[in-house]
Image (cartoon, helix red, strand yellow):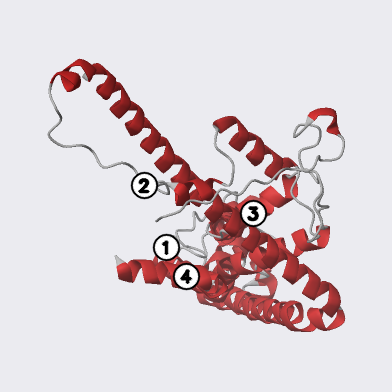
């Protein structure tokens, strides 16, 4: 368990590296999925293009959504986008930076799928086999004598060697080589364009907007850290709240039992007496409660955190509960602070 805990803490502290590794694994998985996928072209004029476009576009969409789902910052982005402004204005630049950071990682696997599909050529061959220039590659003198539906039926069978019967019109190997050459050219062009685009986005863009880039990066990290610290504080408060609540329950039950057996206790001297609770027992847990000791107050605190987060300005106390924390909704009255000291002597 200690090893797993250390690995989990390492992944939490190196979340960016972890997400990059996840995206790399998904990219390799997409390539492996395509190699294991059994591509069967229907070889029908009305279905070849639809089947090929579905194979080319549907898996990248699924992989992109999976990349977003596996990113822990999706919920943080949605929460930051939908929250009320309150005392803290929402910065669209920070939201754009967060979304672009997630989208860049989530696009790796879809780009790999499209590139592998185009470089393989089967999908492109199935989609555009009916567009082969027969007059340039085959027996063009026979084309005028063929009806258009019959010509489309013959060309649609080019991806299927076992049923293709149009060698008298166009050699199948010629059509396959022609279409695969175009597909591979498009695949390498796609790889080149995506690589250049990624280089521009990752390297050149911050040079022109360095100040805005640094601001967006800083505040996106701040939102992430603030959310984690708030979750940790809520977890710590919930543990202390549960512990104090259980202790009070057991103390109340013990008091009821003592009242029920009062007559028996008065009749005979007790053989032993329970040790009194030390004055500072549970004091540490009560300090962790930070004054929030009932369900209603905690619910108001959580609602206030969602609707009216504190302003990003330290050293000044401003009212956060608008009209709900004290009567009149005016300025916050001065609070009396009472310090209680317990002696362990």
Q: Nearer the viewer, residue 44 or 213?
A: 213
Instruction: For the residues labelled 1 and 2, say whether their Cβ atoms are less than 8 Å apart.
Output: no
In front of the other: label 4 or label 2? 2
- What mark, if any, has residue 37 been given in the picture? 1
Q: Classify residue 235 as left or right of residue 315.
A: left
Which residue is the site of mark 4? Answer: 11
The image shows residue 134 at horizontal and vertical percentages of: 65, 69
Say which element carries label 2.
Answer: loop
Which secondary structure lies at badge 1? loop
Secondary structure category for the residue under label 4 = helix
Residue nearest the viewer, comparing 248 with 90: 248
Whether pointer 3 and pointer 1 mark residues with C-beta atoms closer than 8 Å, the reply is no
N-terminal of the two: label 3 or label 2? 3
- Whether tag 3 and tag 2 are in contact, CB under 8 A, the answer is no
The residue drawn where x is 49% and y is 58% is 41
- In this picture, residue 292 sits left or right of residue 35: right
Secondary structure under tag 3 reads helix
Calculate the distance from the C-alpha at mark 1 to the C-alpha at mark 2. Answer: 69 Å
Percent coordinates x, y for residue 104 in the rendering: 66, 69
Q: Earlier in the sequence, mark 4 or mark 1?
A: 4
Report which residue position mark 2 lands on: 278
Mark 4 against mark 1, which lies toward the viewer?
4
The residue carrying pointer 1 sits among few (fewer than 14), some (14 to 19) or many (20 or more) residues within 10 Å by Cα, namely few
Whether residue 171 is visible to the viewer of this picture, yes or no, is no
**Circle 3 is placed at which residue position?**
76
Cα separation between marks 4 and 2? 41 Å
Quarter residue 266 falls in: top left
CB of mark 4 within 8 Å of CB of mark 2? no
């Amino acid at each position: 368990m200690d090893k797993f805990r250390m690995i989990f803490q390492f992944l939490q502290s190196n979340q960016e590296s972890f997400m990059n590794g996840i995206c790399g694994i998904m990219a390799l998985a997409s390539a492996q999925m395509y190699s294991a996928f059994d591509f069967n072209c229907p070889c029908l004029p009305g279905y070849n293009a639809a089947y090929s476009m579905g194979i080319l576009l549907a898996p990248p969409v699924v992989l992109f959504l999976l990349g977003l789902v596996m990113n822990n910052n999706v919920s943080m982005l949605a929460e930051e986008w939908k929250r009320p402004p309150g005392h803290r204005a929402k910065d669209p630049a920070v939201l754009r930076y967060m979304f672009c950071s997630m989208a860049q990682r989530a696009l790796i696997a879809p780009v790999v799928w499209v590139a592998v599909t185009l470089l393989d050529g089967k999908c492109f061959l199935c989609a555009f086999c009916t567009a082969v220039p027969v007059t340039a590659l085959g027996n063009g003198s026979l084309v005028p004598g063929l009806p258009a539906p019959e010509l489309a039926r013959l060309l649609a069978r080019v991806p299927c060697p076992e049923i293709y019967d149009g060698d008298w019109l166009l050699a199948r190997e010629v059509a396959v080589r022609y279409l695969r050459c175009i597909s591979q050219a498009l695949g390498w062009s796609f790889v080149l364009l995506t690589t250049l685009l990624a280089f521009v986005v990752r390297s050149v863009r911050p040079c022109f907007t360095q100040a805005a880039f640094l601001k967006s990066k800083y505040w996106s990290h701040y939102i992430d850290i603030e959310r984690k610290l708030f979750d940790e504080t809520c977890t710590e408060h919930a543990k202390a709240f549960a512990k104090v609540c259980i202790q009070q329950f057991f103390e109340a039950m013990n008091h009821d039992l003592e009242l029920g057996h009062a007559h028996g206790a008065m009749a005979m001297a007790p053989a032993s007496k329970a040790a009194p609770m030390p004055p500072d027992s549970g004091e540490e847990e009560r300090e962790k409660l930070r004054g929030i000791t009932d369900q209603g107050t905690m619910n108001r605190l959580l609602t206030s955190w969602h609707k009216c987060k504190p302003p990003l300005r330290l050293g000044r106390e401003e009212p956060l509960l608008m009209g709900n924390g004290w009567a009149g909704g005016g300025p916050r009255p001065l609070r009396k602070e009472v310090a209680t000291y317990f002696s362990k002597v």
